[in-house]
Amino acid sequence: MPESLRIALLTHSVNPRGGVVHTLELAEALQAAGHVVTVFAPATAGQRMFRPVACELVLVPTAQTLPGVEAMVASRIAAFVAYFSELLQHRSFDLFHAQDSISGNALANLRDQGLIEGFVRTVHHLDVFDNPRLTAWQHRAFAEARQVLCVSRVWQDFLRDEHGIEAGLVHNGVNLRRYSPRPEPGDARVAVRHGLRPGGAVVLAVGGVEERKNTRRLLAAFAALQVRRPDTQLVIAGGASLLDHDAYARAFQADLAASGLRQGTGEDVVLTGPVRDADMPALFRLARVVAMPSLREGFGLVVLEALASGTPVVVSNIAPFTEYLGDAPVAWADPLDVPSITAALDTALQRAPFALPAVCRRFSWPASAAQHLAHYRAQPVHCQA
């Protein structure tokens, strides 16, 4: 394997999801380490990557599809395959690395066509689907990879115990140039833009309304908290997802209506929808606590970003959080127990200001890039056929 690698990193979306953030930050860290990195992401007409990236970025043209996750996944796999089938006639790479099931299936198809020899796949987390085709796609994307990586031990153990796959371990990181507790002049404008109540104590949840994010129990916990702390406000940011969360969102709205809490700008509960990337550091600083009582996560990148911003975090007392947050200023909660989440929110709101936690120095993107390179070189994947 050459000293300087030509690396193709593939991600499934241009939206600010954890796996996409991981892809962009890893790409920039690998590029800074002297490698030539190209990020490939599917995009429909008019779409752009949610933030600039300091390496080559290729938006793979993808057709608009009929509603439905299966049709969308099939369309994106086909778009990747069509694009690379042409590109590889005149361009070569030392390494293809898929960060998700969509790009993993595309690379498996290219391998079956003899256009590449193999690929690397990172498993951030795995989902449970009712649709058998989605389940099969998810399995194929890691089962047929030449090398598999995971961002936490819990998924490393799952792949070994359930699928007999020995995966390497890499970590996420946090960009300390971007996330800081130091106030900036634009913070007040961000507060107004997203409906934060002046003088209130903001409980921030990132990722939208999803079952995996445990948003309904968080809402119930917040409703109980607000009885004692009427100045608190729940702000749920983000929500751009390729999966179908409509049924869960409807149940959340029913819970919200029954709770007596008011929703809207400046009210008890604010759903911002997708947030511009430049606003996220300010939102973390403006929050009094970030709530992440998730039922399932790959790593929990938001936790590091919040802690680097000087904001305490409520996290579930399950892996992967228990793997790396033992000495961090977090409040632990049983994600299945609403009173436990309420108590953790209350504890976090009382936490005194803290210095940059050691965990934010341990987990950096340059360190993650070094881990990736060690795995690449320990098990070379000669990708170009």
Image (cartoon, helix red, strand yellow):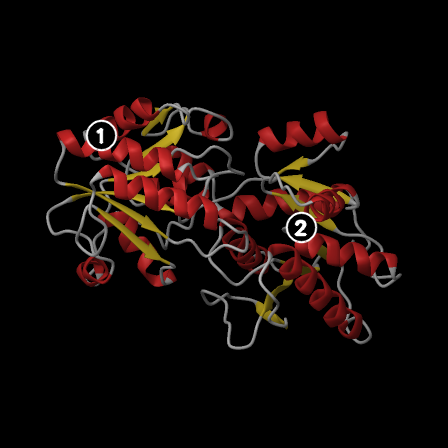
Q: Which mark is residue 2?
A: none
Q: Kindly report the distance in space between the C-alpha atoms of the residues bearing marks 1 and 2.
A: 39 Å
Above or below 17: residue 345: above
Residue 167: which quarter of the image? top right
Marked residue nearer the N-terminal end (1 or 2): 2
In the picture of the structure, the residue carrying the numbered disc 1 is 224
Query: Which one is nearer the viewer's eye here, 29 or 74?
Result: 74
Residue 119 point in image, percent of width and height: 76, 52
Amino acid type of the residue that numbered disc 2 sits on in the rendered structure: Ser
Q: Circle 1 sits in a helix, a strand or a loop, which is it?
A: helix
Residue 276 point in image, percent of width and height: 36, 63
Residue 324 shown left or right of residue 27 in the figure: left
**Picture residue at 21% right of the left edge, 58% below the top:** 187
Question: Around disc 1, counting alpha carbons within 10 Å, would you say few (fewer than 14), some (14 to 19), or many (20 or more)?
Answer: some
Above or below 109: residue 255: above
Asked whether residue 352 appears in the rendered view, the answer is: no
Amino acid type of the residue that numbered disc 1 sits on in the rendered structure: Ala
Residue 233 point in image, percent of width and height: 20, 44
Q: Which of labels 1 and 2 is toward the front?
A: 1
Q: Which mark is residue 101?
A: 2
Q: Contact, CB < 8 Å: mark 1 with mark 2?
A: no
Query: Which one is nearer the viewer's eye here, 31 or 114?
Result: 114
**Picture residue at 32% right of the left edge, 22% below the top:** 340
